[in-house]
Amino acid sequence: MIFFGWLFQSKFALSFIYDRQFNVQYLLNDMMSRLRKRRKLTLLLAVWLCVGTSAHANFVDTPTLICTPKTIVVDIDHDPARHDIENNSTRHATFHRNNTDLMVFPLNGDLAGTDDRAQLKSDLKVQTVDSTINTAKLPSATVLQPELREPSLYALLNAEFAADRGDIERALTLYKQQSFKEDATAVFERALSLSLRHDNVGDSLQFAKMWQDQNPDHVPAWFYVAHLALKAHDYTLAGQSLERILRYDPRTDLSDILIGIYPTTDSDQRELLEALQPINSEQNASLSVLKAGLLYQFNEPEIAIIHINRALLHQPDYVPFITLKADILRKTEPAETVLNYVNQARLRNPDSKSLYLYEIRYLLDLKQSQKALQLLLDAHQRFDDAEITLLAALVSLDNEEYRSADRLLNVLAKTPTYLDQAYYYLGISAERQQRFEQAKSYLKSVMQEDLVLAARKKVVDLELLDGNIDAAINTLADLRKQFTVFAPETYVLQANILWQHDQAEEALQLLTRVSRKYPNDQSILFARVQLLDDRSDYIIKRTLLNHLQALDPSNLSYQLSYAQLLLSNDQNSEQGLELAQNILQVRFDDPRYDNELHLQALNVLASSALANENYAQVIDYLKTPYDVLPTLRSGVLLLRAYQGLGESAKVNALLADLQQRFSFGQHNVNDRVQLY
């Protein structure tokens, strides 16, 4: 294309445009003569001809100059850079426009003669001049040529090379620019693909919407815009796009559009439902099931069942639709009706593992474990599936059918992926059958990282059950060597063993020593805090708790321990009381909520009230919690409050209850409470 730009900037172009006289043979001879002198240019021309495309370069080191069907002429007399241009090997022209024909005049060596320039001046003076562009401002590498309607092959190659080099911004700019030309669907899709990977969803949506507006009949673009609008939470635009698609084809498959767009917040879910409600989805299964899911989410099962039934009319045996209907029925119908529906669907789809598992899990939810086990054994015979085999073994364990469980687990052990799980549950089975040595053997064989810690903890418990303290500690030491990631936790477990066996000082020394190796490990620091005395070690304990709260400011356990520390030294500490009250304010639906911490906070506040002889407040804090979840600590505080009020009958009743529940007042090893 550089060749043609160069050619038509010759005096032959002038002759053709002005005089309308063009000698073809003379032009061809001149072309061949010029090509022989410019071998690189000839090679470049050959390459472009081999490409065989009409989408030619429009290059640009600078913004592309677009030549419209207006006249562009050269006025050398009015060019202030005339002298510089004439002496430059790469020549440019100054352009003027009027409303007639397109004309381009180069200032190159071929027109360097005085006569040619005089002729040009003479010819140009007859033109009407509307505007001027000073070529002195144009860079020397600029090639001036007509803007093509189709995408530029050079620009596309440039964009792809930029993407390959990691210059995504340039690649996207070029691709998006070229996508708005004619017959550029493939370019648009490539641009959108890059945009989805590197732009935010809003930018991708804006680009897709602009392209769709320019290409309103391109149906796939409707789908792109609908999907992106859903992802960007622009539910108004999404609703409009979906409605347009359904007018075009009411039964079109929208599943690809709806993948990964389900909103996570209530407000977005409601907004999406409001956008979908006006759309007639009777003939569209995908949209009907989306409406059903949202209505089910908002506890409107009566309306949801209408939409899911519409979806099932089109796809009666599609398992996700069947299970969604079962979920909806569970809110409106008795369990027997739901089971009958799922059972009938499973019989129609005997090869559906998902329906088997749905029915089995529903039976387990209903505490019908024997029926669930029988169905699991049927599924085990039908499907060669490790997941079903494992589930059947676990249900057998829960039903105390150990022979069946062991048989299934030994089958599972033949599958390498499930070997560690099989060993773990074989160990559990042996433990429940009191075959402790066999249990330890299986549990020591577990090497899967997400199971090994739990397995070794059980080995430690079995060793302690036999009084083998050294063996228990050696098990933890071996685990540290095999899995260094669990080293901090093994030290905490070892300290706990020492503390339980009246070696509190050794436990504290161990944790103090390893805390130097793991200065920011919260489990080690907190275990050490639990072993420090509130009064004699007050400064060290406070320092450690401040450090822990800096590491995890939202941790309620650290806050509660700090409150206990403050109140142990000052029963009226405002900061301590405030921290304990804040823990009580955490709602049960908050991810941080912990029932045990809530009860401990009540005990802390009750202890403070008891120290101030506010006995009624103690009873108010603890009476209901003790009735619901009785603990030794809560019972003792209540007992002292009743004693303070002189309520002998309640004292005697509570004392009898404590003795029965906790062997209170007797020397019993179970009275020892693990600190962490």
Image: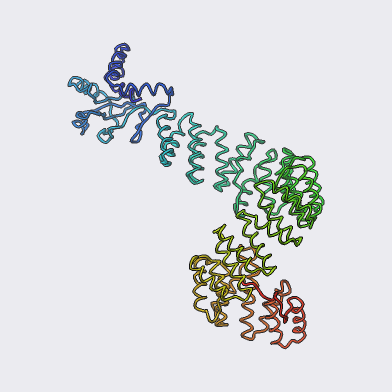
Up/down of 573 relative to 129, above or below: below
Q: Let me know if residue 578 appears in the view.
A: no
Identify the residue shown where x is 71% and y is 52%. Answer: 300
Q: Position of residue 100 (x, y in %)?
A: 33, 24
**Nearer to the camera, 8 or 277:** 8
Up/down of 336 relative to 257, above or below: below
Up/down of 432 relative to 269, above or below: below
**Outermost residue, top side:** 25
**Outermost residue, bottom side:** 646
**Outermost residue, left side:** 114
The image quarter containing residue 254 is: top right
Q: Position of residue 81 (x, y in %)?
A: 21, 33
Identify the residue shown where x is 49% and y is 35%. Answer: 188
Figure quadrant of the N terminus? top left
**Nearer to the camera, 483 or 640:** 483
Up/down of 421 relative to 550, above or below: above
Q: Let me know if residue 420 appears in the view.
A: yes
Q: Position of residue 568 (x, y in %)?
A: 57, 81
Query: Would residue 242 appear left or right of 120 to someone viewing this image?
Result: right
Q: How many marks?
A: 0
Query: Would residue 404 appear left or right of 203 to someone viewing this image?
Result: right
Identify the residue shown where x is 59% and y is 74%. Answer: 580
**Nearer to the camera, 598 or 22:** 598
Q: Position of residue 295 (x, y in %)?
A: 68, 50
The image quarter containing residue 289 is: top right
The image quarter containing residue 257 is: top right
* Colouring used for the render: rainbow
Identify the residue shown where x is 59% and y is 75%. Answer: 504
Figure quadrant of the C terminus? bottom right
